[in-house]
Structures are given as structure tokens and as C-alpha cells.
Amino acid sequence: MSERLYQVIAKVMNVPVSTINDNVGPESIETWTSFNGYVLLYELETEFKVKFTMDEAMDVKKVFDIKRHLKNHGVSLDG
């Protein structure tokens, strides 16, 4: 399931999925602009059928944070 998350991020950021891991974020991906950050949130909400709060959206600094918020919404990223 993490692979599914990584694929969404890679598609939005227009980078190879192999460059995505839990420690990457706006600081390490040049195309992770504020606009693409909003696009990513929309795509994640659509893909995983969740709705992020503004606080959750502002809290994302790395992919790990996205995973944490998805888990808080009951999304299993294992297996």
C-alpha cells in the first residue's frame, strides 16, 4: 500500500517513483511547490477516500507525515 502512496506522489511531483521514500518532502523534491502540494492533497484525498484538515495539510513536511495522517484516518498502508 505504501507503493500506491508513492505512485501518487511521484505522479503529482513528476519524479520517478524510485525517488520517493518516507524522508522526502518539499525540501528534497524540487517540483514539490506549494501548488503541487495542494494538488497532492487533492489526489491523496481522492485515492484514499479521506478528507484532511487544514492542520494536517500544514503539518506535512515529509512523506512520513502523510503516512501518519492517512493512518489516523484509518487507511492501512501495510501489505
Image (cartoon, rainbow, N blue to C red):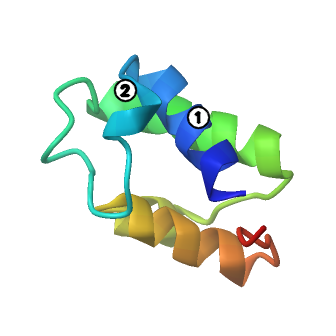
Q: CA distance from mark 2 to mark 1?
A: 18 Å
Q: Residues within 10 Å of mark 1 (few under 14, many from 20)?
A: some
Q: Which residue is mark 1?
A: 7
Residue 67 in the image: x percent, y percent? 55, 68
The quadrant of the rendering that contains the N terminus is bottom right
- At 50% across and 37% down in the image, what residue appears? 9
Where is 58 relative to 74, above or below?
above
Q: Earlier in the sequence, mark 2 or mark 1?
A: 1
Q: Which mark is residue 54?
A: none
The quadrant of the rendering that contains the C terminus is bottom right
The quadrant in which residue 26 appears is: top left
Q: Residues within 10 Å of mark 2 (few under 14, many from 20)?
A: few
**Contact flag, marks 2 and 1 (Cβ < 8 Å):** no
Query: Which amino acid, by three-letter code, is at mark 1?
Result: Gln
**Name of the residue lying farthest toward the bottom:** 72
- At 36% across and 22% down in the image, what residue appears? 15
- At 27% across and 62% down in the image, what residue appears? 23
- At 25% across and 23% down in the image, what residue appears? 31
The quadrant in which residue 33 appears is: top left
**Name of the residue lying farthest toward the right:** 49
Q: Closer to us: mark 2 or mark 1?
A: 1
Locate residue 8 relative to residue 76 in the image: left or right.
Answer: left
Q: Which mark is residue 35?
A: 2
